[in-house]
Image (cartoon, helix red, strand yellow):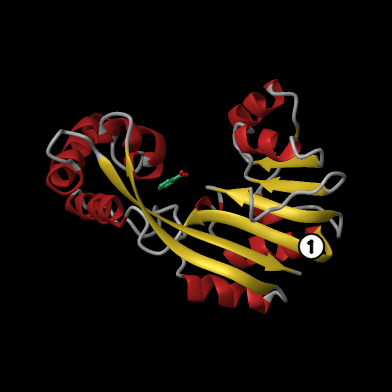
Amino acid sequence: MQLLDARPGELILDLGCGDGALTERVASYRCTVIGVDSSLPQLEAAKGRGLNVVLMDGRQLGFQRRFDAVFTNAALHWMKMPETVVAGVTNSLKTGGRFIGEFGGKGNVEQIRSTLHDILRMHGIDPMPIDPWYYPSPEEYSELLSKFGFIVSYMELIPRPTKLPGDILGWLEVFAQPFTQAVAEPERPSFLQEVRDQLATRLRDDNGNWVADYVRLRFKATK
Ligand code: BEZ
């Protein structure tokens, strides 16, 4: 929120707004916020908060030079084809507009990701075409933004080990669906159990809490 520095009267795009929790906070700065997301259930939740939201794929942003800022949180790592996304962001912004965000950066959930890959391979499945995540390094993402004409004023990789509210199985059910769905349905419970067993020695602390190895990339750039 501090990096975004939203001012009253501004027009702001929330890219990957999800259920609108942060969109609502941006709107509280007395600016107009439009949220886009590719998930209908998430948009329904955002509409329930009275927000102005549109069903849109981040790779097909259809705005022309309208926004003072594009804001994004925990969404860009789900969007492969990052060049197409950044091209859409730059088209959406006015000259001088800001692009501010945070998402998974290089090394994010590396223990979880590599374990999912290993166990899928043991099941005879190539994980590469299934893996939905994009986790660039600061250098890689700065270079991409610069290529599309942005001036990058801030870019930081932030390790953030995060205690999960429950078991890793709950996390996997929410976030690892593309991996699990690649496994035949009858084998899914044992697949998840194998992943859990492998991760238990690395991600569970002495009190039995699961701590995910999150790493975030936070940035600010100007068009
Ligand atoms: C998230 O969308 O919050 C997320 C996705 C994958 C790994 C970690 C977090």
Which residue shows up at 39% across the image and 39% down it? 177
Q: Is residue 157 above or below residue 115?
A: below
Which residue shows up at 62% across the image and 50% down it? 72
Q: Secondary structure at mark 1?
A: strand
Q: Pick whichever, 213 or 87, lies toward us.
A: 213
Quadrant for the C terminus in the image: bottom right
Q: Residue extending furthest top? A: 48
Residue pointed to by mark 1: 97
* Residue type pointed to by label 1: Gly
- Decide if residue 55 is in sight here: no
| Residue 52 image point, x, y percent | 78, 33
Q: Pick whichever, 132 or 129, lies toward us.
A: 132
| Residue 80 image point, x, y percent | 53, 58
20 left or right of 126 in image: right
Quadrant in the picture for residue 91: bottom right
| Residue 191 image point, x, y percent | 21, 38
Q: Pick whichever, 122 or 112, lies toward us.
A: 112
Which residue shows up at 57% across the image and 74% down it? 142
Q: Is residue 148 above or below residue 57?
A: below
- Decide if residue 198 is in sight here: yes
